[in-house]
Image: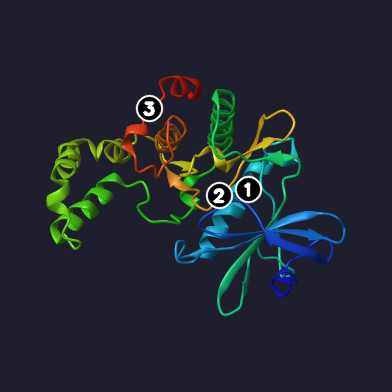
Amino acid sequence: MHSVLSCFALSGAPVSCEPYGNGHINGTQLVVCESGTRCILQHINTNVFREPEALMRNIELVTAHLRTKVSDPRGVLRLVMTHDGLSYAVYGGGEYWRVYELVEDSVCYQSADRALFYESAVAFGRFQNQLADFPATQLVETIPHFHDTPARYQAFYRAVDSNAADRCEAVLREIDFVHERAPFSHMLTDLQATGELPLRVTHNDTKINNVLFDATTNQALCVIDLDTVMPGLSVNDFGDAIRFGASTAAEDEPDLSKVHFDLHLSETYL
């Protein structure tokens, strides 16, 4: 890791580097420098993000815009640039790395009570508001068709037709359930096409664990995990937040009897 870190303009030589956080996609390390400053080193997963340079350009543009809107320096993620002035380093046969300054005196939660869920709504609402005057067309899609429901439906129909795992007979009721809702699948994209829903800068992963909170007050500080920031519809960010935050169970809970929609949490977010 020290060889990778030598590419970046750190505030001092790194003295330790240890695994950090609960992320599942990018490899994340907490780095402590001899000056006492701390930063976050991340290995970008190019199996998920096929255009890492475009992704990093998105993050550069968005964080630069956000810095003009915040007074607390902890209100936006800050990249540490390389000695060549880039926001990323390519090392070890094409592996992409980046470094963020650590947001000090902050905490991240995996689940939320009503107060924290409300603060997460504040964070994502503020994020949307601060980027409302940023031209979303300057950004690229880091995951193409990520929230394109008609495209998702077409992929679903292809999977049903191929029946590669020979399991369709066991889930006919579920297939019918999805098929019956096909007429609604293009509603948002139609409204976008007519201009009734404007294209915005969207986060696309609006979960509680993508918000940093003040370690003392539990007030929302900033939104993190900006890899999926791209052009989209604000309503998708809202829906994703409710889907995750107002659920009574984890996203991958196999026992569906535990999965319910908490109206009180939904009202709190609204």
Return the disc, 3 or 2, that comes first in the chain's sequence. 2
**Toward the viewer: 65 or 82?**
82
- Left or right: 12 as drawn, with respect to 122: right
In this orientation, does residue 164 appear? yes
Camera-near label (2 vs 1) is 2
Q: Do the residues labelled 3 and 1 touch (CB within 8 Å)?
A: no
Mark 2 sits on what residue? 226
Q: What residue type is labelled 1?
A: Thr
Label drawn at residue 63: 1
**Toward the viewer: 255 or 220?**
255
At x 24%, y 55%, the residue is 155
- Left or right: 59 as drawn, with respect to 200: right
Q: Which amino acid does label 3 sit on?
A: Phe
Real-space Cα distance between discs 2 and 1? 9 Å
Residue closest to the far right: 35
Q: Which amino acid does label 2 sit on?
A: Leu
Which secondary structure, mark 2? loop
Mark 3 sits on what residue? 261
x, y (%) of residue 115? 59, 24
In this orientation, does residue 133 appear? no
**Toward the viewer: 65 or 212?**
212
Q: Are marks 2 and 1 in contact (CB under 8 Å)?
A: yes
At x 25%, y 46%, the residue is 150
